[in-house]
Amino acid sequence: MSGRLLGKKLSSYQIIISGFLGVILIGTLLLMLPVSSKQRIWTAPEDALFTSTSAVCVTGLVIRDTAMHWSVFGQTVILILIQIGGLGVVSVAAFLATLSGRRISLLQRSMLQDSISAHQIGGIVKMTGFVFKVAFLTELLGALVMLPAFCRSFGAAGIWMAVFHSVSAFCNAGFDVMGGKTGAFSSLTFFRGSTGVSLPICLLIVIGGIGFLTWDDIAANRLRFKKYRMQTKAILVTTAVLILLPALYLFFSDFSAFPLKERLCLSLFQAITPRTAGFNTADLTAMSSPSRAMLIVLMLIGGSPGSTAGGMKTTTAAVLIANALAVFRKKKNARMFGRRIEDAVVKNAATLLSMYLCLVFAGAFLISALEALPFGTCLFETASAIGTVGLSLGITPALGTVSHLILIALMFFGRVGGLTLMFAAVSSKSAEVSQCPVEKINVG
């Protein structure tokens, strides 16, 4: 009944935002409990809120090492929050309702459509079931593949580690439980040359990051690329380019001194993980300035629409590039794969880019001013937060309360999405019905 009452007062976008806030609050309260920490003490509200937000927003930035501070109960709470945040609060609620035999109303179907960025409302419940089956099966297979490597290194504890890292990787969360074995905030550096961990993690990140609609298209059309929707083609091509080019650059620059196998693993892993996954197998502080700048760009782009990943999205980058090419060629409309892109989509993409750049630079400026830290270092952290990545140069745990709140706000914005927040803030009744006179203005 409360859901129906809320449905009359709030738009679907506002309900999605409320759902994320509610889960973050519940996670905060659970993580504050003594049972959630290894020392059986109350965790500070700020630390619990930051961790809960990072988990639900599948970011991976932490101020307490996950393995060293949190108990098995706390780690389980974090893992559940990651799963809910990765698959979407609305999607999880609908899936549980379906399992209990409840009927999904039209309003709930509309919320599902907005939550996973589906093009149409028809078949949305069936698709949600498909998404959960693929997600759980992929996470299970990922854990089984990594199980030998983890158990070989850490014994029976490797079972939990394989499961935790499989879910975290698929959901593009970047949380790890390696700290108790390999040192605080060490991420997956222990496995930097291990194909048994590095490659499965990379594959899980990519599968989780290409989006639910892409899975559906591939399942329907198999490997017949020409039959894919334009969005699927744009996602696959953009994803391939954003993996291949950075990997080649890192292979011939930062990791040129490593043995071939290790060099390949390091290059591929660091090319994939910035696009919202957050794991690292290399020392990021030792990387060159151009490489870190490249990582910032990759973090801002992020994954794909309707996926477990955050960021501006690969389609946003593809649309902006297509529009730029159209301008260079003096074409009337942006095009991709023989299809025209609507002007409204180009406007949304340009707006998203502007919002992300303004927020990431403003956040970096404020943190740099508050903490007296180099602007470039702060920019890396804010890009990681808004891109829901989780990569860090090591400054996040030592930041003050205000800086932590800035990162929390950026993580929430990055996961919920700029357009969702805008549509939630602006009433649908405020649609434009009149137009102003046209007057020319020069740009460039």
Image: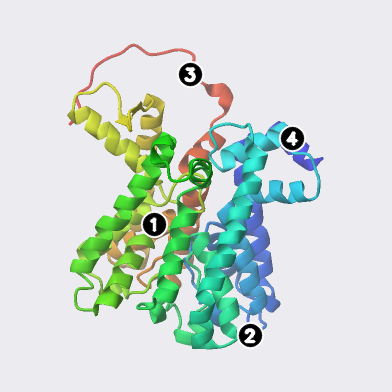
The quadrant of the image that shows the C terminus is: top left
Judging by the rendered image, the residue that carries numbered circle 1 is: 275
Q: Residue at x 56, y 66 (%)?
A: 141
x, y (%) of residue 35?
70, 78
Q: Residue at x 80, y 50 (%)?
A: 100
First in sequence: mark 2 or mark 4? 2
The answer to whether residue 353 shows anywhere in this view is: no
Badge 2, how many Cα within 10 Å: few under 14, some, many 20+?
few
Judging by the rendered image, the residue that carries numbered circle 4 is: 105
Q: Secondary structure at mark 4?
A: loop
User: Which amino acid does the dot numbered 1 rest on?
Assistant: Arg
x, y (%) of residue 185?
44, 77
First in sequence: mark 1 or mark 2? 2
Up the image or down, 422 lies above or below 383; here it is: above
First in sequence: mark 3 or mark 2? 2
Mark nearest the camera among 2 and 4 is 4
First in sequence: mark 4 or mark 3? 4
Q: Secondary structure at mark 3?
A: loop
The answer to whether residue 359 shows anywhere in this view is: yes
Judging by the rendered image, the residue that carries numbered circle 3 is: 432
Whether tag 3 and tag 2 are in contact, CB under 8 A, the answer is: no
Using the image as rendered, state which of residue 108 and residue 375 is in the foreground. Answer: 108
User: Which amino acid does the dot numbered 3 rest on?
Assistant: Glu
Question: Could you say which quadrant of the image residue 355 lies in?
Answer: top left
Q: Real-space Cα distance between discs 1 and 3?
A: 36 Å
**Residue 206 shown left or right of residue 4 in the figure:** left
First in sequence: mark 1 or mark 3? 1
Q: Real-space Cα distance between discs 1 and 2?
A: 34 Å
Badge 4, how many Cα within 10 Å: few under 14, some, many 20+?
few
Q: Real-space Cα distance between discs 4 and 3?
A: 30 Å
Using the image as rendered, state which of residue 56 and residue 100 is in the foreground. Answer: 100
